[in-house]
Image (tube, grey):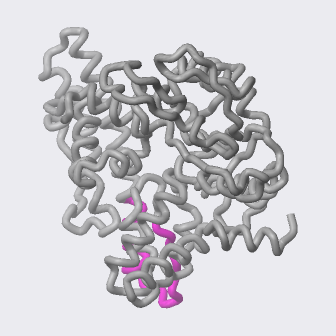
Amino acid sequence: MDEELFLNIKQRYGIVGNNSKLKRAIDVAIQVANTNLSVLITGESGVGKEALPKIIHDNSARKHAKYIAVNCGAIPEGTIDSELFGHVKGAFTGALNERKGYFEEANGGTIFLDEVGELPYPTQARLLRVLESGEFIKVGSSTVQKTDVRVIAATNVNMAEAVKRNKFREDLFYRLNTIPIHIPSLRERPDDIPLLFRYFANRCTDDYKMPRISVTPEAEQILKSYPWPGNIRQLKNITEQIALIERARVIDEHTLASYLPHEGILVPMHNNGTGNNDTNFANEREILYKVLFDMKKDMNEMKKLVHNLMQRQGVRKEDIIHSADIEHEIFDTKVELHSVPKQFEHHEQIITPEEIIEETFSLEEREKETILKALRKNGGKRKQTAIDLGISERTLYRKLKDYNIE
């Protein structure tokens, strides 16, 4: 791709980064824009898949027609056919008038089906018919209608695996996957992460008329080495938190680490040249704390399995507690817990074997509690709650129904 064109596209659509895989994805999007071929965009949640469909539409012959983006995971299963294909009056309870669906509204234009892997199996058959012949039937009608729509789909699901498990139609997968485009995760483009951090930080501080922030070299190394499971969405949220909350405008590695989930995080040791043994000891102690916490977590997991197995075998609680003596000895160390470094304060505290036994270890209860906390945090807004939890809105709706959460 021409470098000037690449820069113009990045500027127009707010794309940040110079990674070769990202550049390749944009290049393919531009090349296929003037065709009518279906495109399937894949990539992890939060990588920014929604930008490419706009690029394709805006550089196609359909750019003056409608562009409609549909989040398939956010529409309840019972109404998604009506949303996509429309319905006639009286088709179901509450259908007081005839309604156009997205495929009718987008006639002549482009429709973007985000989270297409969440489509119910019956709806997949209807979509396949549109892709093959341009035909669809409204819910409750017997009249075949025609539409001319370019379909672009996106998913974070492993579609080949979904086909094997009969969760997604193989014929539809191949129809959608005519032109595959993959968006790399942040783990695949570490050199772009500091650029994205500065972009989000500067935009946030400029919006709120605050001094700009920067990071130390050690903090930048953490940015690049952290796995970022939530990708750009997670990086943006954490960057904005730091930019708004921290009074110091130069962010060091300890401050940054306090905002990150601690799995896989280790603050790098560095020698300031003074040979201060106290400082070196503190760094080594931080490593020791991480090892201890990780050991404790692993043993807690083992304890869950042993506890459940012994309960099924009819073993008394006293015997289970006795079997945990070795764990008690491991963590009965002379560690002063009040001196735990700041970045480890969010770890759950070391607990006794008796406390482990009393815990229910119910994954369902923990999941329900997590959902409730996220709902409260977002004021009951389900869309933002689903984003924070890293699940689709449809999955969230199902969880709410399963746990009877109003």
What quarter of the picture does the C terminus occupy? top left
Residue 106 x %, y %: 61, 42
Q: Is residue 313 magenta?
A: no
Q: Residue 30's quadrant in the figure?
A: bottom right
Pick the front one: 259 or 56: 56
In the displayed structure, does residue 39 sit left or right of residue 44?
A: right
Q: Nearest the camera: 77 or 317?
A: 77
- The answer to whether residue 277 is seen in the rendering is no
x and y percent of residue 142 in the render?
55, 14
User: Does the magenta portion include 269?
Assistant: yes
Total marks shown come to 0
Give x and y (percent) for residue 189: 67, 60
Q: Residue furthest right?
A: 2
Q: Nearer the viewer, residue 34 or 215?
A: 34
Q: Residue at x 34, y 66 (%)?
A: 343
Q: Is residue 95 above or below residue 279?
A: above
Compared with 268, 334 (above or below) is above
Q: Where is residue 118 drawn, in percent x and y?
A: 51, 31
Check the image and name the residue furthest to the top.
313
Identify the magenta region.
267-288
Q: Is residue 115 visible?
A: yes
Q: Relative to 285, is 251 above or below? A: below
Seen at 67% across and 21% down, the residue is 129
Query: Residue drawn at (61%, 69%), measured in percent from left and top?
Result: 14
Residue 304 placement, left or right of 273: left
